[in-house]
Image: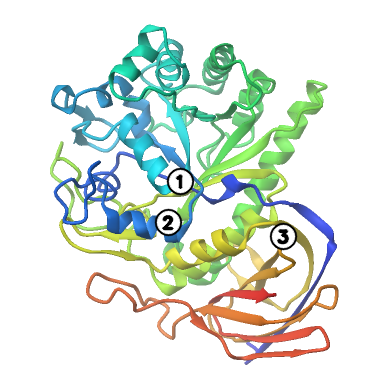
């Protein structure tokens, strides 16, 4: 292996991919583990506001910068009775949550979620239960949430203290309905028909042109009917929905960390496959419409690793799926973000799963502190600086060998032009051992100040913990030379880098 890589990129603001959609920086709150209870909602916490929301967590969410939140699931939604979570809290029933083997208290429901969204200024994204329930229940929920008044469900909302409709414009038609783990799993034909009926009926109530609906795609690229599922579902729903969903999680399989570093290769292939299938259905139907992708679950998730003691059956908000992320995980996470930006011509919504405690960038302790995981930083920097227009980038990079994907470019990058004339390059050195000299030909733009932020660590397993909350964080990278429109930056091995050209 070489002791040093050299790579080069160039771009021109005249050659673009797409405007970055606001919804690309979404996240996800599910009634799972401690995401809600002792995560965002803990009325007894010293920082809790009048709505029971933890102000320390709210501050971190604002810093993280999500633009949209998907709710209430996830697998949870396929057994959820939304009516349980509205009205006086003392009257709300407790229910068994079959998805995660816990008891749901329903002390946090739709009204609380909407207050949360308004407090952190994010767009709500609501999922409907097409597992144990169906068309009528979806219509009832939509009427409660979005109709102004004068009907049973809309007046019930008003009696619960929300005079104005919520105006939710993005709706998921179920969740992972192809999965055998899903309550109420359906075949592609069964799901395609109920999704189409639900979509058309919701549009009858809404009556506007700005309602966006998401049909369930395959739960992962590895599902046995991937492609065939999308084809059948979209054959039924092509003219009634706007998005098909994609879900993907990554972790090192059998200790293969080299392939793990190249996880974005799989995400790229996933996106390619969904686009090809969707466009083929459109061609078959002779439609001018394009179906976009809502990548509404993505993250690093150690699905095969234990995450603590197994919770007692039917306990309330136990610790579940509380992955503690390393510096290496953060770099892979950043590479996944780069992929979403690079494909933002067709991936026009996405949700980091999840927001707090459950495979999340923010961790909390009940009654105690909240802190940033390593994955917090790439998302926060991308959300802050990755706004504007994605540029076509020509890249020349050495490759490294992976067991799963063959030869893969060591450099993974994207450039985003801001409205203020700045350009931000997000660059990942995916090689675990070899540093890289990156040359950026920025001669097509005016180069003033250049600043570089780098996240890496000599210990790839280094993590931020409750006892050492700042162990891993981005630092200013001073290894930068600017001369005649050429920017030279030294990128450490296994690093996420934010390069700002102002």
Report the disc number at residue 419: 3
Residue closer to the observer: 212 or 347: 212
Location of the N terminus by quadrant is bottom right
Bin the neighbour count of mark 3 within 10 Å (Cα to Cα): few under 14, some 14-19, many 20 and up: few
Outermost residue toward the top? 151
Report the disc number at residue 3: none
Residue 40 horizontal/vertical position (percent): 29, 48
> At 52% across and 20% down in the image, what residue appears?
191
Is 417 on the left-hand or right-hand side of 491?
A: right
Give the secondary structure at mark 3: loop
Give the secondary structure at mark 2: helix
Q: What residue would you read off at disc 1?
A: 121
Disc 1 and disc 2 in contact, CB within 8 angstroms:
yes
Give the secondary structure at mark 1: loop
Residue 249 horizontal/vertical position (percent): 47, 52
Location of the C terminus by quadrant is bottom right
Whichever of callouts 1 and 3 sits on the residue coming sooner in the sequence is: 1
Residue 189 horizontal/vertical position (percent): 57, 18
Res 227 visible: yes
> At 41% across and 7% down in the image, what residue appears?
150
Res 260 visible: no
- C-alpha distance separating marks 1 and 2: 8 Å
Residue closer to the observer: 260 or 339: 339
Whichever of callouts 2 and 3 sits on the residue coming sooner in the sequence is: 2
Q: What residue would you read off at disc 2?
A: 62
Whichever of callouts 1 and 2 sits on the residue coming sooner in the sequence is: 2
Residue 350 horizontal/vertical position (percent): 55, 46
Disc 2 and disc 3 in contact, CB within 8 angstroms:
no
> At 30% across and 60% down in the image, what residue appears?
363
- C-alpha distance separating marks 1 and 3: 22 Å
């Amino acid at each position: 292996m070489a002791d040093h890589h050299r790579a080069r990129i160039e771009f021109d603001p005249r050659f673009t991919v797409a405007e970055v959609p606001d919804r690309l920086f979404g996240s996800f709150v599910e009634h799972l583990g401690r995401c809600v209870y002792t995560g965002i909602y803990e009325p007894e916490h010293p920082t809790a506001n009048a709505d029971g929301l933890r102000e320390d967590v709210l501050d971190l969410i604002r810093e993280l910068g999500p633009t949209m939140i998907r709710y209430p699931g996830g697998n949870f939604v396929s057994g959820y009775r939304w009516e349980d979570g509205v009205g006086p809290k003392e009257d709300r029933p407790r229910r068994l949550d079959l998805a995660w083997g816990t008891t749901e208290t329903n002390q946090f429901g739709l009204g609380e979620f909407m207050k949360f969204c308004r407090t952190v200024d994010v767009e709500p994204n609501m999922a409907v239960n097409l597992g144990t329930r169906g068309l009528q229940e979806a219509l009832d929920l939509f009427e409660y949430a979005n109709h102004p008044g004068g009907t049973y469900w809309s007046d019930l909302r008003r009696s619960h203290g929300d005079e104005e409709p919520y105006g939710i414009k993005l709706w998921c038609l179920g969740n992972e309905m192809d999965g055998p783990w899903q309550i109420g799993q359906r075949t592609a034909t069964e799901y395609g028909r109920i999704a189409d009926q639900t979509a058309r009926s919701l549009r009858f109530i809404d009556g506007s042109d700005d309602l966006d609906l998401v049909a369930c795609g395959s739960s992962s690229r590895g599902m046995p009917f991937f492609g065939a599922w999308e084809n059948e579902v979209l054959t039924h729903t092509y003219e009634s929905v706007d998005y098909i969903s994609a879900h993907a999680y990554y972790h090192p399989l059998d200790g293969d960390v080299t392939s793990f570093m190249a996880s974005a290769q799989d995400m790229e292939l996933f996106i390619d496959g969904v686009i090809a299938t969707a466009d083929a259905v459109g061609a078959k139907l002779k439609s001018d419409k394009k179906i976009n992708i809502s990548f509404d679950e993505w993250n690093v998730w150690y699905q095969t690793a234990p995450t603590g003691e197994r919770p007692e059956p039917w306990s309330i908000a136990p610790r579940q799926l509380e992955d503690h992320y390393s510096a290496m995980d953060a770099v892979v996470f950043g590479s996944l973000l780069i992929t979403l930006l690079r494909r933002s011509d067709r991936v026009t919504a996405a949700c980091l799963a999840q927001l707090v405690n459950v495979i999340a960038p923010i961790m909390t302790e009940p009654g105690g502190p909240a802190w940033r995981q390593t994955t917090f930083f790439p998302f926060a920097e991308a959300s802050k600086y990755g706004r504007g227009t994605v540029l076509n980038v020509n890249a020349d990079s050495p490759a490294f060998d992976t067991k799963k994907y063959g030869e893969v470019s060591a450099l993974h990058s994207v450039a985003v032009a801001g409205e203020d004339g700045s350009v931000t390059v997000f660059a990942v050195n995916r090689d675990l051992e070899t540093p890289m000299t990156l040359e950026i030909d920025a001669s097509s733009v005016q180069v003033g100040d250049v600043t570089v932020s780098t996240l890496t660590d000599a210990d790839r397993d280094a993590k931020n913990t409750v006892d050492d909350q700042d162990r891993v964080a981005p630092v200013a990278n001073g290894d930068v030379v600017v001369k005649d429109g050429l920017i030279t930056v030294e990128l450490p091995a296994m690093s996420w880098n934010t390069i700002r050209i102002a």
